[in-house]
Amino acid sequence: MDKIKKYTNDEITVIWQADLCIHCGKCAKGLSEVFKPQERPWVDMTGATTEQIVEQVEKCPSGALSLEYNEEEKDETWDATPIEGTPDVEVIPNGPLMVYGDISIKDKEGKLIQKTKRTAFCRCGASANKPFCDGAHRSIVFDD
Ligand code: FES
């Protein structure tokens, strides 16, 4: 079974997939205030800003580190009545496509990925973790 750990702050959740990690130490060298391999838990989400953490996670060469954005602030004007038993989908202006609910995704290699609660899919095309959003839409100033 894959060993997956999640670490969160108010804005993002960093996901670490142990099976993919090549232990190159790039994360610890790049942002030692957050990534501390000698400590437990080894990720301290209070050690840097969200932007700094996103920037470092994007540099992970193996893809062992990835991230998700926590639920965006709900638009108060959004009053669609959810259909029971189906995930809700929301287009975030200038950002990802949010899916709320438990879903299964078959990636381009045919691997099944299961997500719970909320999933951010990239709409801008710039994510290094497609099909998921990794925050790159902010650096490219995605406008849609
Ligand atoms: S929409 Fe977020 S990285 Fe593309």
Image: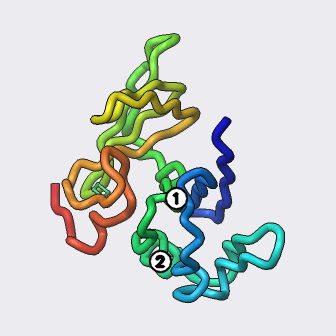
Q: Is residue 95 left or right of residue 76?
A: left
Q: Position of residue 65 (x, y in %)?
A: 52, 61
State the SS at label 2.
Answer: helix
Image quadrant occupied by the N terminus: top right
Q: Position of residue 140 (x, y in %)?
A: 21, 71
Which quarter of the frame holds ligand 1? bottom left
Examine the rendered structure and indicate whether residue 5 appears above or below residue 78. Answer: below
Of residues 95 and 40, the one nearer the viewer is: 40
Amino acid type of the residue that numbered disc 2 sits on in the rendered structure? Gln
Examine the rendered structure and indicate whether residue 5 appears above or below residue 126. Answer: above
Q: Residue at x 45, y 62 (%)?
A: 62
Please name the residue that numbered disc 1 is placed on. 64
Q: In the image, which disc is placed on residue 32?
A: none
State the SS at label 1.
Answer: loop
Please name the residue that numbered disc 2 is placed on. 56
Q: Nearer the viewer, mark 2 or mark 1?
A: 1
Q: Which quadrant of the structure image shows residue 120?
A: top left
